């Protein structure tokens, strides 16, 4: 049998990027021969095996033919006579359709000259920084639209080939995107959100029409005006992309990026006669994001963080104006006492929102430091002692809670005088 390293490992090595995982293709073998050599079968839908020592995945060369719509709608043929070129033809992008013989796989790319199997000119597209589909079979799997958009977010200086964009638009028009499985949509979105330039993912999805199908709540934000004195960029969709790229710049975790993505969805439903003001958009955003999270099966931590950020980001931005009791109520609504680590993520998302505005990218966000100090002061209040004393005085339930609230508010009275 002949073994080749394929796909992303070859691409990343040629780009000078770290190679963390390698995918291997085996040509000229059978499942029985692989098992006889100690490989462990793990694939359900097609023959994939784990190497007996390295535990890396080795897949038999195969072809795929679409038989029905949906993730499972493919007929897979893996046989000893399937060539490497045929296997590479089923891959999504030319930059992912290159292979190198196993003997050279761990050598530097400089040793690969003359040995790279590249029937679809992936090296050319790497050099010219173009994302291009391999064959028209790209249209058989709508997940590839999401993958390409994710790659655009990872390799932000790459363009999408005109013919590939045209093909993706046709796929959307044909209704292919309507049949994507929610788990796959979220999987690709999450990976794209964690890229270096998430805005590129949404730009590509919007350009081909997929965003309107997958996230209409986000797609409708483009063209919605905001007050220029607060948002020099004016357009809400542009603001959202600035926020997402700020979240990447600040290296925030996934839950924060989810909150950033969904915090202003309500602005897309603001009545036209009140624009560019967005009165009550916070509550509308919460309702919309709850539906989005349910539809895409977003993890609970992201959903709950997004709810708090959508509801409270305006109050957090204006928190310097709040007196001790109002500040304490804000902390309570954010559940900052019971979930201090999550509150820090809430503030991260709010900082991304504030700095995700044209001309504000380098601005300070003192609200975060001040609110973290407020949280620290409140956590220092000895509530157990207060509760015990209140019980001795015959107080119960809500009355004890009110006394604790007052004590915490008193702790905040001099917050701005602390060094």
Image: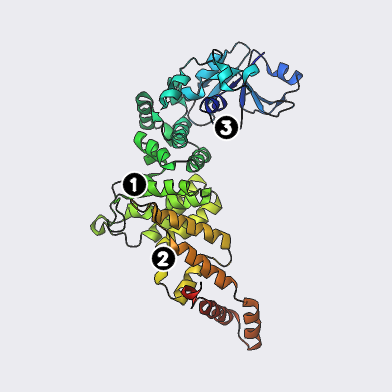
Residue 99: x and y in percent read 56, 19
Marks 2/1: CA–CA distance: 22 Å
Depicted 276 relative to depicted 137: above or below? below
As drawn, the label of residue 89 is none
Say few, some or many: other residues with alpha carbon within 10 Å of mark 1 (under 14 / 14 to 19 / 20 or more): some
Looking at marks 2 and 1 on the same chain, the residue that comes earlier in the sequence is marked by: 1
Q: Which residue is rendered at x = 38% and y = 47% of the image?
A: 242
Could you tell me which secondary element the residue under label 1 belongs to? helix
Q: Residue at x 41, y 24 (%)?
A: 128
Question: Badges 1 and 3: C-beta atoms under 8 Å apart?
Answer: no
Question: Where does label 2 land, which residue?
Answer: 315
The residue tagged 3 is 18
Q: Are marks 3 and 2 in contact (CB under 8 Å)?
A: no
Can the viewer see residue 62 in this picture? no
Disc 1 versus disc 3: nearer the observer: 3
First of labels 1, 3 by sequence position: 3
Q: 91 or 362, which is in the foreground?
A: 362
Residue 47: image location, x then y, percent: 64, 23
Q: In which quarter of the image is residue 31?
A: top right
Label 2: which secondary element: helix
Circle 1 is placed at which residue position? Answer: 238
In the orientation shown, which residue stands out farthest toward the left?
273
In depth, the one of 178 and 218 nearer the eye is 218
Residue closest to the far front:
419
Say above or below: 255 vs 150: below
Q: In which quarter of the image is residue 28?
A: top right
Going from N to C along the chain, the mark reached first, 3 or 2, is 3
State the CA–CA distance, disc 3 to disc 2.
Answer: 43 Å
């Amino acid at each position: 049998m002949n073994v080749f390293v394929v796909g992303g490992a070859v691409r990343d090595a040629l780009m000078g990027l770290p190679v963390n995982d390698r995918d291997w293709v085996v040509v000229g073998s059978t499942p029985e021969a692989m098992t006889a050599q100690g490989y462990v079968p793990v694939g359900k839908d097609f023959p994939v095996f784990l190497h007996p020592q390295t535990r890396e995945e080795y897949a038999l060369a195969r072809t795929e033919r679409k038989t029905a719509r949906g993730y499972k709608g493919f007929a897979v043929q893996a046989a000893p006579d399937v060539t490497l070129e045929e296997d590479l033809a089923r891959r999504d992008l030319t930059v992912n359709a290159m292979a190198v013989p196993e003997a050279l796989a761990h050598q530097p790319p400089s040793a690969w000259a003359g040995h790279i199997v590249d029937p679809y000119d992936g090296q050319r597209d790497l050099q010219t920084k173009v994302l291009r589909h391999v064959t028209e079979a790209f249209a058989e799997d709508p997940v590839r639209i999401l993958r390409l958009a994710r790659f655009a977010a990872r390799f932000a200086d790459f363009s999408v080939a005109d013919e590939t964009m045209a093909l993706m638009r046709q796929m959307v028009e044909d209704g292919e995107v309507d049949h994507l499985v929610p788990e796959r949509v979220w999987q690709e979105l999450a990976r794209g959100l964690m890229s270096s330039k998430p805005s590129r993912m949404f730009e590509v999805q919007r350009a081909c029409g997929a965003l309107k199908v997958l996230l209409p709540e986000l797609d409708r934000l483009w063209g919605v005006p905001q007050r220029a004195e607060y948002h020099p960029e004016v357009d809400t969709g542009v603001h959202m992309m600035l926020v997402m790229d700020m979240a990447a710049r600040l290296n925030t975790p996934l839950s924060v990026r989810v909150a950033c993505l969904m915090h202003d969805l309500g602005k897309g439903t603001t009545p036209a006669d009140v624009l560019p003001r967005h009165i009550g958009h916070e509550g509308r955003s919460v309702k919309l994001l709850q539906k989005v999270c349910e539809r895409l099966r977003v993890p609970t931590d992201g959903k709950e963080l997004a709810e708090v950020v959508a509801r409270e980001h305006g109050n957090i931005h204006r928190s310097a104006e709040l007196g001790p009791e109002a500040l304490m109520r804000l902390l309570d609504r954010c559940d900052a006492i019971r979930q201090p680590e999550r509150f820090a993520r809430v503030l991260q998302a709010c900082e991304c929102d504030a700095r995700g505005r044209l001309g504000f990218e380098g601005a300070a966000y003192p609200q975060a430091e001040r609110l973290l100090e407020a949280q620290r002061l409140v956590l220092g209040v000895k509530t157990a002692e207060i509760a015990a004393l209140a019980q001795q005085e015959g107080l119960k339930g809500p009355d004890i809670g009110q006394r604790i609230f007052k004590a915490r508010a008193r702790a905040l009275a001099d917050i701005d005088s602390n060094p």
